[in-house]
Amino acid sequence: MAVVIAVDAGTTGIRAFAVDDAGQPVGWSYRELTQHFPRPGWVEHDAAEIASSVSATLAELHTSLTEAGHTVAAVGITNQRETAVAWSRATGEPRHRAIVWQDRRTAARCDALVEAGHLPAVRAATGLVLDPYFTGTKLEWLLTEGAVDADTDLAVGTVDSWVLWHLTGGAVHATDPSNACRTLLYDIGDRAWSPDLCDLLGVPMAALPEVRPTSGRFGRTVEGCGLPAGIPVSGIAGDQQSALFGQACFEPGMVKHTYGTGGFALLNTGTTMPPVVDGLLTTVAWDLDGTTTYAYEGAVFVMGAAVQWMRDGLGMIRSADEVEALALTVEDSAGCVVVPAFTGLGSPWWDPWARGTILGLSKGIGRGHIARAVLEAMAFQTRDVVDAMARSAGCEVAELRVDGGAAGNDLLLQLQADQVQVPVTRPFVTETTAMGAALLAGLAEGVWSTLEEIASLWTAERTFTPRASKGSADEPHARWLRAVERAQGWATDT
């Protein structure tokens, strides 16, 4: 049987994931990535470790697939977005550690660009805000502070282009619009790199990857990449756009939310670029056969990372799976509110200077209340971005499709349904980020023929309907908004 493999190069690890032509998982392999924190607010990855982990997971998965009698029809790539990688064209070696999307080192530079009046032009061209979250100021930092020379040997890009380079043995330096649009360097209306923005941030256009359609053949694998030579690499999408595709949100108004390290809600707005609005990002969802689909996005910096903090920072739980049971030891959070703004606040606030806070503490507050408040914070943040997207798109959200690690938490999804006041649906296959990349690659290579065929593969595992009235849901949400006000503008430097 022919299968399609997705390389999911995420923030905390690398996963190789295979699906059959019925869209069912048939195997996977995983390697955790080392997180480097050289200074407070700085987050880095070793790009060489990313490449070696891709090779190792692919080799392990391919061995198991071969033993099961499967052949590989195509490979797709999905990735943590906004992370900046710089490397040598001649040697393929990194010029510096990759600067991760969570990194805050360019917050002051973003503020300076805003003060200089550049925000309106940047918003109009890219749909983004001037925030250290995005790739452009990270690349500028590498070139000005990171001792990376802007010579003819330099290649820069996001993680997808770095992975593609290694899978093809350096033959292809390319990306897709869903990743390019996250760099602060790509004009989403013109669908091309912007000379003005590249000049503003001092990024040489010659070092950037070629932008190609999301679904289509980028190149072929070479020996030594973890797979046999000659397998088509035929789809690339940033992780959140890939999840939107994997959730079969093909019609305007459909929404998905991913509970990952961060939280990301995307609403399909169709093939007409929507207006740029405050608090949200306007982004490219995908490009199929030259037709671009756009989306509104709400990006929350801390979701699963808050549970990780409970485990590693506070020692309250031994594994992330324990947070639901701990939260269920109490009936409510007893007025305790956790704002997990560890690296600032994303949508709809966009405050890189916000920091985490716990409010409403009393002697009666225990571990269970804090655990429940962390889950509530995830639901509140999701409500904030879904409400903002629905208002901006002028549509009613009929359903919220969810995925990511925390989507297995039934208490969280019930809290979420109560907050958004619409059904929240968990699919049978929750690895929708990897699924989307596999579907995009398979679509390019004829494993699937149409979006309608792909949509038929998606099935719901469970739907959570609101139990709380809107009024009773609004009361704790109002308390949350008061807490957010107190968390904003706390830090004075990175």
Image (cartoon, rainbow, N blue to C red):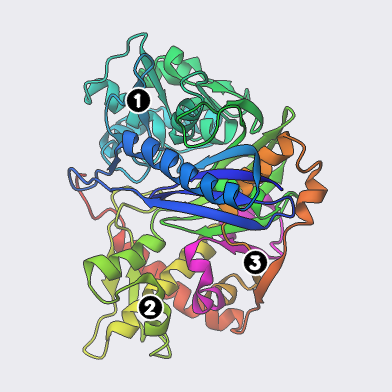
Residue to which mark 3 is pinned: 428
Instruction: Looking at the picture, tell me which residue is in the foreground, 315 or 203.
Output: 315
* Quadrant of the drawing holding the C terminus: top left
Residue appearing at x 28%, y 49% in the figure = 353
Q: Does the magenta stretch include residue 27?
A: no
Residue to which mark 1 is pinned: 86
Q: What residue type is labelled 3?
A: Phe
Q: Which of marks 2 and 1 is nearer the N terminus?
A: 1
Task: Judge left or right: residue 144 versus residue 200.
Answer: left
Which of the two marks, 1 or 3, is nearer to us in this view?
Answer: 3
Instruction: Looking at the picture, tell me which residue is in the foreground, 30 or 477.
Output: 30
Q: Which of marks 3 and 2 is nearer the N terminus?
A: 2
Note whether residue 429 is visible. Answer: yes
Residue to which mark 2 is pinned: 322
Residue appearing at x 72%, y 59% in the figure = 458
Mark 3 → mark 2, Cα distance in angstroms: 22 Å
Tag 2 secondary structure: helix
User: Which stretch did the figure color magenta?
Assistant: 386-414
- Report if the CB atoms under discs 2 and 1 are less than 8 Å apart: no
Tag 1 secondary structure: strand
Mark 1 → mark 3, Cα distance in angstroms: 38 Å
Measuring from the top left, give residue 223's x and y in whole percent. Answer: 49, 27
Measuring from the top left, give residue 450's x and y in whole percent. Answer: 81, 43
Q: Residue furthest top?
A: 152
Q: What residue type is labelled 1?
A: Ala
Q: Which of marks 1 and 3 is nearer the N terminus?
A: 1
Q: What residue type is labelled 2?
A: Glu
Instruction: Looking at the picture, tell me which residue is in the foreground, 381 or 42.
Output: 42
